[in-house]
Amino acid sequence: MTQDTQKSAPGLQLDRADTRVRHDAGLSGALRGFVDQVRSGDLGMLPVVIGLLFISTVFSALNPVFLAPNNLVNLLFDAAAVGLIALGVVCVLLLGEIDLSIGSMSGLASAITGVLWVNSGLPLPIAILAVLLTGALVGLVYGYLRNQFEMPSFVATLAGLLALLGLQLYILGPTGSINMPFTSPLVRFGQILIMPAWLSYLLAIAPGALLVYGGMRRNQQRSAANLSSQGMSVVITKAIFLTVALVFAVYYLEQGRGVPWMFGVFVLLVLILNYALTRTKWGRSMFAVGGNAEAARRSGINVKRIRLTAFVACSTFAALGGVFAAARLASASQQAGTGDVNLNAIAAAVIGGTSLFGGRGSAWSALLGVLVIMAISNGLTLLNLSSSLRYMITGGVLAIAVIVDSLARRSRASHGRA
């Protein structure tokens, strides 16, 4: 074809370009896209997955009990409460903010649950509703201070940490603790309730099926709009790998006690938040504000409202995490929410892949990150090592995660300039 013919055939050139796009949308194209994504600094959840595999390999080699089914079931029970708190941390980190009072909020939530339910005799659902409303109110206060007075969230939530801790001690009174009935639904939920095997397998198959359905529907919509679409081979391959992994995980856990309801509820909330962040206007606004608040404001996004909702979500998740922790421990005490709760929740969100600089992260960060934190804690406990070593290792892992995030951020910036 001559040069003149090429110039007079733009439609033919577009057809060839479209063919290349569709060809690249296959498995090989998806693989090349993933490699390019990693090279550009967008590592996603790859570091935490590799880290989790490494941690599991090391601890299982040192003590085979680590990968025993029942030990993993206990790990999932322990992960649910901290994971819920980390889920709220993801919301504020996406905006480049922080909440240092999440531990105190969870401790206050457990105290309120014990006082209203055990001491006052109110129905459990009413007590939990009061806890969630308290968490939302605290988040509203933080959001108001940030929006109205430009008070840094670090300072506002540090003041809240002290205030909530004092309120927790005041509510519990001189006894300092409230024991919850072991036969109650809440304690059984936090310690022994397990999903039926058929439901666990059904839930393990559902994500893969939804992935295929979503891929087909998305391709139909893009084809109707005359846009290139991702090859279904990529979607089906992802669905197969995901389904096989989840079904194997359920099968392995069923060799022990099974999948805890407590962890199942946590995963359900992860899915809900993931949908809200990726498929709603609110979620897109969260990423926009975290990436560049001024640009988001100029594009018409109500930045103050987004900040307010992020703090409300964070405190509410922390309150619900406190209820889960009370269920797990069967008590509300002055020690609830203290110690390493703040460290573990924030570290889980960051280690899972949520950026401290804002604008990057996902709800899955809380899930993967808390599994890493709980794996380290559980493995060191099995090895009879001191808690001081657990603090040092967790701090080291957190530092590595922040360094990786900083390097990836720098790589993305240089790649964008190039």
Image (tube, rainbow, N blue to C red):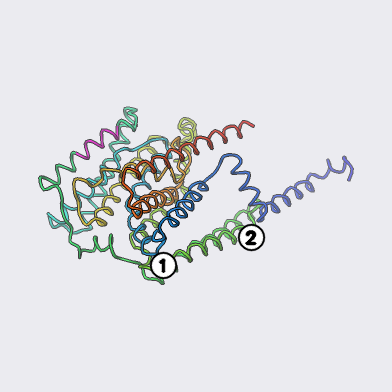
Image vertical order of residue 230 relative to residue 387, above or below: below
Mark closer to the chain start, 1 or 2 = 1
**Label 2 secondary element:** helix
Write the residue at 75% across / 47% down: 14
Return the x and y of residue 28 as percentages of the image width and height.
67, 54
Which residue carries the number 2 mark?
Answer: 233
Marking on residue 200: 1
Return the x and y of residue 52 as percentages of the image width and height.
46, 51
Does the segment drawn in magenta span residue 232?
A: no
The part of the chain drawn in magenta is 156-165
Q: Is residue 159 left or right of residue 55?
A: left
Residue 396 position by quadrant: top left
Marking on residue 27: none
User: What's the distance in space between the residues labelled 1 and 2, CA to CA?
Assistant: 27 Å
**Label 1 secondary element:** helix
Q: Is residue 344 visible?
A: no
Write the residue at 66% across / 48% down: 32
Name the residue type under label 1: Ser
Q: Which of the two discs, 1 and 2, sits closer to the camera? A: 1
23 or 264: nearer the viewer: 264
Figure quadrant of the C terminus: top right
162 or 52: nearer the viewer: 52
Return the x and y of residue 384 as percentages of the image width and height.
32, 52
